[in-house]
Amino acid sequence: MIQSIQSQQSAATAKAQATFDALLARAFTSGVKLS
């Protein structure tokens, strides 16, 4: 059960990290185009 919770947490963390990276990349690209 503990193992299951840990794998759920790491999956959620990985998903959040990927989302953040995508948003950051989009913001950076928009910023470069703007300037």
Image (spheres, rainbow, N blue to C red):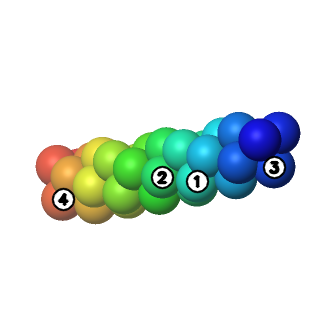
- Left or right: 35, with 11 as reference point: left
Residue in the picture at 18% in, 59% down: 33
User: What amino acid does circle 4 point to?
Assistant: Lys
Q: Nearer the viewer, mark 4 or mark 2?
A: 2
Q: Nearer the viewer, mark 1 or mark 3?
A: 3
Q: Which residue, given by chain and number where applicable, does mark 2 sit on?
A: 15
Q: Are marks 4 and 1 in contact (CB under 8 Å)?
A: no
Q: Are marks 1 and 2 in contact (CB under 8 Å)?
A: yes
User: What amino acid does circle 2 point to?
Assistant: Lys
Distance from disc 3 to disc 2, alpha carbons, whole Å, reads: 18 Å
Secondary element at image label 2: helix
User: What amino acid does circle 3 point to?
Assistant: Gln
Which sits earlier in the primary sequence, circle 1 or circle 3?
Answer: 3
Secondary element at image label 3: helix
Q: Is residue 32 visible?
A: no
Distance from disc 1 to disc 2, alpha carbons, whole Å, reads: 6 Å
Q: Which residue, given by chain and number where applicable, does mark 4 sit on?
A: 33
Residue in the picture at 28% in, 55% down: 26
Q: Which residue, given by chain and number where applicable, does mark 1 sit on?
A: 11
Tell me the quadrant of the picture where the N terminus can be found.
Answer: top right
Q: Is residue 3 visible?
A: yes
Q: Nearer the viewer, mark 4 or mark 1?
A: 1
